[in-house]
Image (cartoon, helix red, strand yellow):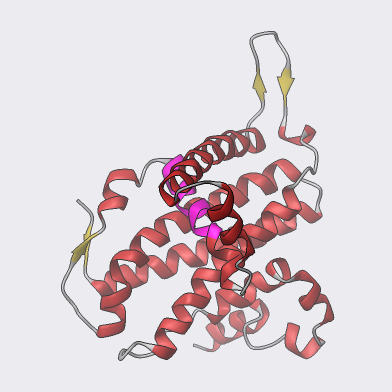
């Protein structure tokens, strides 16, 4: 059983989101260094952290807004907290909302038109998500470890090619960002509790989640108050 008070859950959730955004940033650095295998591995780890954060958010979204202090149990975390595929699957399914989040509903219409009933579409998507989670876990291992198969062939992370790593990383950054923005909107529009900023995590993701906009942004914006250098200085002043 995983029981937490809402305040404890908020600390845990923010730590998970901070770690997810940091893993995305570190994966971006590895991508720039052409270390594609390890970049993919960190991308998958970020999505696993997001999966745990989603379980917590689903349980505590209302108490965080209403100020309820009663402890709650996060059943999914208790049941699946050690399962890499379950955590990744949760983030993968959440990512289905990304296009609609930014106003593109075409994929939803195609799903309903081509897949028959909604139940059939849901079941098919769950099967796809499970397969994607299994493959992501294997890709994560390939990016970290040297291995030798039954025929004597040795594989190394340094041999992994770029493939779709850059696109996968950007999507992961956007999905992590989506939950941060949703939380921001909840606090601005629904909560009676004090605002609890995650701007630093959102800012960390911008060069990856919206790379074109970031490249076009002014130097003043890119070195703004949530830049790591400013954050370090602020911590030092404290």
- The relative height of residue 102 versus residue 170 in the rendered view (above or below) is below
Spot occupied by residue 189 in the image (x, y as percentages of width and height): 41, 89
- The relative height of residue 51 versus residue 99 in the rendered view (above or below) is above
From the viewer's perspective, is 32 left or right of 59? right
Query: Is the magenta region chiefly helix, strand or loop?
Result: helix
Spot occupied by residue 71 in the image (x, y as percentages of width and height): 17, 68
- Considering every residue shown, the one lying at the far right of the view is 216
Spot occupied by residue 190 in the image (x, y as percentages of width and height): 36, 87
From the viewer's perspective, is 16 left or right of 150? left
Residue 156: quadrant of the picture: top right
Q: Residue at x 50, y 79 (%)?
A: 198
- The relative height of residue 65 versus residue 152 in the rendered view (above or below) is below
Q: Residue at x 34, y 63 (%)?
A: 56
Asked if residue 89 is among those painted magenta in the image, a careful observer would answer yes
- Which of these two is toward me, 93 or 231? 93
- Which of these two is toward me, 29 or 116? 116
- The relative height of residue 79 versus residue 205 in the rendered view (above or below) is above
From the viewer's perspective, is 90 left or right of 176? left
Spot occupied by residue 2 in the image (x, y as percentages of width and height): 23, 55
Q: Residue at x 34, y 87 (%)?
A: 191
Residue 212: quadrant of the picture: bottom right
- Considering every residue shown, the one lying at the far top of the view is 151
Picture mark count: 0
Asked if residue 152 is among those painted magenta in the image, a careful observer would answer no
Range of magenta residues: 84-96
From the viewer's perspective, is 116 left or right of 153? left
Q: Residue at x 73, y 48 (%)?
A: 165
């Amino acid at each position: 059983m995983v029981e937490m008070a809402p305040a404890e859950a908020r600390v845990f959730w923010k730590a998970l989101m901070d770690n997810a955004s940091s893993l995305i940033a570190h994966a971006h650095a590895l991508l720039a260094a052409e270390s594609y295998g390890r970049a993919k591995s960190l991308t998958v780890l970020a999505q696993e952290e997001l999966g745990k954060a989603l379980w917590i958010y689903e349980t505590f979204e209302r108490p965080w807004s209403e100020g309820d202090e009663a402890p709650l149990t996060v059943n999914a975390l208790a049941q699946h907290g050690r399962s890499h595929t379950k955590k990744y699957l949760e983030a993968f399914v959440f990512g289905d909302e990304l296009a609609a989040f930014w106003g593109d509903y075409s994929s939803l219409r195609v799903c309903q038109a081509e897949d028959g009933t909604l139940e059939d579409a849901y079941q098919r998507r769950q099967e796809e998500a499970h397969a994607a989670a299994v493959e992501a876990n294997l890709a994560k291992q390939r990016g970290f470890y040297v291995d030798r198969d039954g025929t004597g062939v040795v594989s190394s992370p340094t041999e992994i090619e770029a493939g779709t790593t850059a696109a996968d990383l950007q999507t992961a950054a956007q999905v992590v960002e989506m939950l941060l923005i949703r939380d921001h909107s909840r606090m601005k529009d629904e909560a009676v509790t004090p605002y609890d900023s995650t701007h630093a995590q959102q800012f960390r993701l911008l060069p990856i989640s919206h790379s074109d906009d970031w490249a076009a942004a002014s130097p003043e914006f890119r070195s703004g108050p949530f830049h790591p250098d400013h954050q370090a200085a602020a911590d030092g002043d404290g």
